[in-house]
Amino acid sequence: MAIDSNPDWWRDAAVYQIYPRSFADANGDGIGDLPGIVSKVPYLAALGVDAVWLSPFYPSALADGGYDVDDYRDVDPRIGTLAQFDQMVAALHEAGIRVIIDIVPNHSGSGHAWFQEALASPPGSAARARYIFRDGSGPDRSVPPSDWQAAFGGSAWGPVGDGQFYLHMFDPAQPDWNWDNPEVRAEFVDILRFWADRGVDGFRVDVANALAKDLSADPLPSAEEIALVPAGPDHPLYDRDEVHDIYAEWRAVFNSYDPPRAAVAEAWTDDPARRARYAQPDGLGQAFNFDLLWAAFDAAEFRRVIERDLALARASGSSSTWVLSNHDVIRHASRYGLELPAELEDRRALGRGWLLAGGRAPVEDIDSGLRRARAATATIMALPGSVYLYQGEELGLREVADLPDAVRQDPLFRRSPGYDVGRDGARVPLPWTAAGPSFGFGVGSAHLPQPAWFGQVAADVQAGDPESTLNLYRRALAARRSLLTRPDVRSAALEWLDSPPGSLHFRRGPWHCLVNFSAVADLELPSGEVVLWSLGSLGNGRLAPATTAWVVG
Ligand code: GLC
Ligand code: CA
């Protein structure tokens, strides 16, 4: 089944995120690679995904797992070659699976030729103008230009040693590009064409809300001052209106291809309404909706997020995106198993650290976490829009919370000692087989240690068990794909039906989805054929707690 030419494929695609270093290692050096991905194309096809999104595979010092890109037009030699990239795209396309790649335009890696050139060039030079260099203050210019903190901790300004500093909103090895510079703009247009010409179907745009900056104030505002400014037109760094000029230019590039290339923004905006602007047809076209990451496993919270996002997507001419896990957050099988303080009303009050704090989680109820994760996944797969799945969630993997500090790689951990364990617990190489030195990930050891319990949840174990999470994903994706071909489903708007408190019931034409979030005694299924149970069946036409069912009536 090769891919078709449908320009709207992304609107309801099931997209599987591959974190290349941790997916499959074909040559046994401990790092996942492109031949490893090719070897798993049959697995991905059997899983039934429409597209894969590859996190960065570019040459990189791996200061931030590859989100520090040293060369935007090549493949890291540890991960593969450009020729292998072409082979991978061909193999995926042959299997009917589209390819989305990650573009990291807010910053490069510090090994990038242009950053090295900037360091070797004098203050005020054209080479420095591609990044954001500022004079230090104080008598010997040794004080950073402002007190801003980087996202991973520490000052956001790196000293050059000649009285200047460069801005890095993330790791010191991730210098921010200067998007006011026409050369930078032209370079990225060329990079997008480079990959689109190689047959890439879409782009995931990293930190899409941070490219446009206004650093004209002198002196720069303090961290305390900008903390009071909501992200938006008045904020010097985040979600400024001019950022959309950049994406309008990119959209023209995407639309010059047939079919047009798709794009999805990673934009952690505070105001969901502002997120919709990234998703407009004259912009990137789609934006991640991370709101379910903050929601408890709770009927009212889910319904609020779902209604709001469907309305926003409609208004922006886009389609919704549903995300429960990715490489930056605690895996949802663990998130749903955590005991959170009862008095906590808004999980955002805990900050993003809560999402990332897998290792410091006090209590984890493994059974309930997995049960809820399966129910939540079956819910988002029934919603209009696309779903983004993260490698390993189809195995029901939970966060590897007990990695020894010595093996952790994430700069978030290294730069915020004791504060945040970072994201490595969601990035442990996948278990493919119950046996073998790295559970089939490779023939040697893996770049992060895998826990013993990975053997019980390996893909080969689950493949043979009809009730496994892997087979739930396969069944759900197959049923979803076939239901989405039905005109009576496609033409139907989502409609809510009455259901007891603690449960949700919606339908799209004949396709009903019922979710029992709590121990509701009496949730009866409507008449029709039950095409999916997220976890077994009660056998009496009733829905067990923390279970989702699809019924076609
Ligand atoms: C995005 C990526 C994250 C990375 C950061 C800096 O949030 O998803 O992994 O650390 O950008 O590039
Ligand atoms: Ca390898």
Image (spheres, helix red, strand yellow):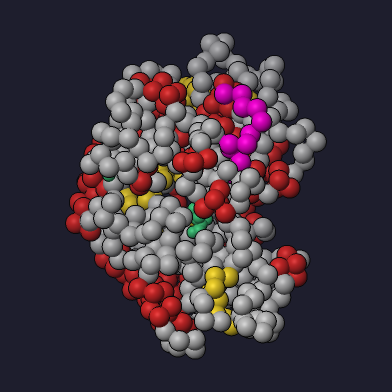
- Give above or below for 527 relative to 390: above
Q: In x, y percent, where is residue 479?
A: 41, 31
Q: In x, y percent, where is residue 501?
A: 73, 28
- Give above or below for 192 relative to 543: below
Please tell me which residue is depicted at 51% across the width and 25% down the height of the picture: 534
Q: Nearer the viewer, residue 325 or 351?
A: 351
- Give above or below for 253 relative to 12: below
Please tell me which residue is depicted at 67% across the width and 36% down the height of the picture: 296
Start and end of the magenta stretch? 356-366
Please tell me which residue is depicted at 46% across the width and 55% down the height of the picture: 64
Please tell me which residue is depicted at 69% across the width and 20% down the height of the picture: 520
Check if residue 364 falls in the magenta segment. Answer: yes
Residue 175 seen in render: yes
Check if residue 15 falls in the magenta segment. Answer: no
Q: In x, y percent, where is residue 134?
A: 57, 81
- Which quarter of the figure has residue 8? bottom left
Q: How many marks can you see?
A: 0
- Which quarter of the figure has residue 26? top left
Q: Answer left or right for 217 relative to 72.
A: right
Q: Residue furthest right?
A: 343
Q: Answer left or right for 463 relative to 214.
A: left
- Give above or below for 151 relative to 308: below
Q: Residue furthest front?
A: 140
Q: Answer left or right for 432 relative to 121.
A: left
Residue 282 seen in render: no
Q: In x, y percent, where is residue 65?
A: 43, 52
Q: Answer left or right for 495 relative to 190.
A: right
The quadrant of the image that shows the N terminus is: top left
Q: Nearer the viewer, residue 290 or 549?
A: 290
